[in-house]
Structures are given as C-alpha cells and as structure tokens.
Image (cartoon, rainbow, N blue to C red):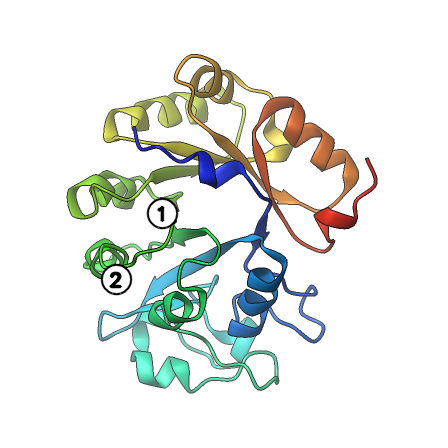
Amino acid sequence: MAKISWLTKRPIAHRGLHDMNKRVWENTLSAFGRAVEKGFGIECDVHLSSDRVPVIVHDGDLKRLTGTDAFAWQRTAAEIKALKVGGTRDHVPLLSELLDLVRGKVPLVIEVKGSAGHDDGLVEAVAAQLNAYAGKAAVMSFDHWLVRDFKRYMPGIPAGLTAYGKDNALIEAHFSMLAHGLDFTSYAAGDLPNPFVSFVRERLKMPVITWTIRDKAAVDLTFKYADQMTFEGFDPDRLKT
C-alpha cells in the first residue's frame, strides 16, 4: 500500500475551487488556480478524447458545460480544448495543462471516468502523464474495469475506489475490489457509516475521503467516520467549529 498521508492533510476542492458555476466554473484552470492559492488539494475528472488524450470534464456529454451536443470521445483534444466553459474565458482543459499549472504545489486526486466501449487506452494515457509527474497525485474511479488496470500501468501512483451505497450487493462489490491494490477509497458521505468503510479504515488502515461535502453537518459526518473531505460551495478554512 502506498504511503499517502499527504492525501488527508488538507481538504480537497471538488472539481477545483469553483463558485458553484457562477463566475468560476468547475474543472477549469481558473478553479484549479484558486485551489492552489488556498493550498487545497484538487479533485478533477478525466475523460478520453477521440485521439486518446485525457481531457478534464466531469460529464461525458459536453453539452452542460459548453453547449456542444457531443460526447468527449467524439471530439479530438484540440476540438475540446477550443470549447469555452459556461460562456467564460475558460476552456475545457487537458490533463497536461493541469499538471503544468500545479507543478506539485498541491496534491491532485484524479477521477478517471469510463465510457463503456469508448475508453480503451484511458488508463494508459493517464499513466503516461502521471508516471512522469513529480508532484503528489492519486487516481480513482467508480468503474471497476478501469480500477483493475491502475496498478498495471501506474504501480507507483496511489489508486482509489470511488464508491457509494449501503446495500449488501454494493458493499460486496466494493470488497471485491480490495484484490486490485487499492490504497484509499472516496465514499459518498451520506452513506456513512457502513461495513466497507469501517473495515478498510480500521482493519487495513486505509485512508477514506468523502464526497461531496457542502455543509457543516456533512463536515461533521466526515470527520466522525472518515479522514478528509472533498468539498464545494464553501471555504473550509472559514468554517466555524
């Protein structure tokens, strides 16, 4: 298991330190720059373009953020990078642009987003960039078929399972992924506590981060059952305890 005490030292800005898409939009270089200025870790989402380049966008469908009626896998990286986000000056960034911006100043938690049938080479493409990156970075995914390849292509990068749920079927599926070299998990705060999180945290000493924290009640829940939060919509440094 990788040594990743750095993962839980500071709160992690969900899709960067945006303002809920008012002026500074999610997953943009502006949001990432604001997180760096505050010393927060950065969580972001990566899809694969048609020419096999990792691009930073949460939705596979580009319409919500850019107005373009297409999926990320249908457009080249250059075409996606040319798209403006939310009518602002920010464009959809490439993963390489985030790495160049951050340069190790804060930790990165990169959620690798699968598109069934269209994501061949995604893990390899992310690995090619992170294996050459000198800063602290981790990868995670909901998609089990991607998580299974993390340690194959980037054995030195901390690997996590993004997860949710309390029902037995989901919990059993999460336990099955422990065979694939997990180093941490990112769990839906509203589904805490549960047997999986308790086991990995207490028995395996594996760090647990939560998503997505938007109020004081969720902050309190996080630090009762987990180790750090992925937050949005407020400044944790200004939160009254």
Q: Residue furthest right?
A: 240
Residue drawn at 42 percent across, 12 percent down: 203
Along the line of sight, the residue nearer the viewer: 170 or 54 = 54
Find the distance from the CA under tag 1 to the CA under tag 2: 12 Å
Q: Quadrant of residue 45?
A: bottom left
Q: Quadrant of residue 104?
A: bottom left
Above/below status of 84 relative to 226: below
Q: Which residue is mark 2?
A: 129
x, y (%) of residue 73?
31, 70
- Please, what secondary structure does the residue beneath circle 2 have? helix
Above/below status of 232 relative to 142: below
Q: Is residue 155 left or right of residue 65?
A: left
**Count of numbered circles in the view:** 2
x, y (%) of residue 159?
33, 39
Q: Residue flagged by tag 1: what amino acid is it?
A: Val
Q: Which residue is mark 1?
A: 139
x, y (%) of residue 37?
60, 64
Along the line of sight, the residue nearer the viewer: 15 or 193 = 15
Q: Is residue 12 left or right of residue 121?
A: right
- Crowd rating for badge 2 (residues with CA inside 10 Å; few <14, some 14–19, many 20+): some
x, y (%) of residue 54?
31, 66
Q: Earlier in the sequence, mark 1 or mark 2?
A: 2
Above/below status of 151 relative to 67: above
Quadrant of the image containing the C terminus: top right
User: Circles 1 and 2: CB distance less than 8 Å?
Assistant: no
Tag in front: 1 or 2: 2
Q: Residue flagged by tag 2: what amino acid is it?
A: Gln
Quadrant of the image containing the N terminus: top left
- Crowd rating for badge 1 (residues with CA inside 10 Å; few <14, some 14–19, many 20+): many
